[in-house]
Image (tube, grey):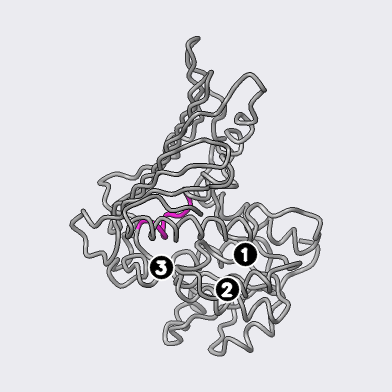
Amino acid sequence: MSITKRVLVCGAGSIGRRHIANLLQLGAEVSVWRARSELLAEISHDFPVYVHTDLTNAITGAEAVVVATATDKHVAIASATLKAGRALFIEKPLSHNWEGIENLSHLAKSKIVEVGFQFRAHPNLIALASQLRLPAHQRLLTYRLAMGHRLDAWRPNQVYEQGYSANAARGGGALFDLIHQIDIALWLFGPVVGVHAVLAKLGDLNIHGDDVTNLLLTHKNGTTGHIQLDMASPVYRCEVEVMTTDALFRWSNAEGKLLQLSPEGETIVDCLPDGFNRNDLFYTHMAHWLKRIDNTEVLPLCSFEDAVEALRVALCARNANTLQEMVKT
């Protein structure tokens, strides 16, 4: 950053704390607001930040705002931020329903907005996106994406039942909390025109919503693909498999390698550098957003419009599950 930015972080759960730490490392002057004001003291104890109890005053005093609250609070805080003319970083998903999204879209026009789909900063997936710019004689056929882990193991330092992730009414459940995979599908394969979905509660955790979700997406270019999301798997998984006419690409987040398989054998297309860790995705994305504030010509990693499309697909999936039929987007 060319000059110190005054950045307000709204929310101080696990993701909010991650953003606070990264912003401080990036040299920002950070302040924090959280809905549960009785917990603000622990934030000022853990980080060298100013804490706010009044959201309006907090936004007024900042140059840029990060929204990292529960999903059902996103739209109201983001709207206040954009009305105040501040740059916005909003965590995924934008919301858990369509209420207020069209107005938010209007407010976001010509503003600096970045949405926290951090996998767009993953080197292996950037390499895969490059590989999928296929020559004319090759075609994309289908794909499989998967992501999940038991919620109690995924967030071991929290009482999982108390968080919004365990409650679909607040934007939790597998479909919305793991919407990263829908964004990856849109990024790599283009617009979606049809959605089949089955949302189920199959695991043994106390989750009020879907903990195993299966989607079948049809894209505008004719590609079809399967996305499986869960909060029930005994081990963490985050995987991508893409089939083209000439090769099969496989990626595992745990392994940090992108492989290409063909009749000639297996090739490592991309491998993570030594020392790479999960926080690098969040740090890179946050640094990119701050860079955009200084230089409005820099394009977003994940735009507001991209996030609207991911939300649209997720809402269509919920509707498709209810109707038990394909829903057009």
Q: Is residue 50 above or below residue 258?
A: below
Q: Amino acid under label 2?
A: Val
Residue at 54% over, 73% down? 47
Label 3 secondary element: loop
Q: Position of residue 103 (x, y in %)?
A: 62, 75
Residue at 49% over, 25% down? 259
Q: Position of residue 106 (x, y in %)?
A: 68, 72
Hey, which residue is sitting farthest left in the picture? 204
Q: Is residue 280 above or below residue 49?
A: above
Q: Main secondary structure of the magenta part?
A: helix
> Mark 2 or mark 1: which is in front?
2
Q: Is residue 180 magenta?
A: yes
In magenta, the rendered stretch is 174-181
Residue indicated by mark 2: 9
> Mark 3 or mark 2: which is in front?
3
Q: Is residue 210 magenta?
A: no
Which dot marks residue 23?
Answer: 1
**Label whose residue precedes the other's in the sequence (3 or 2):** 2
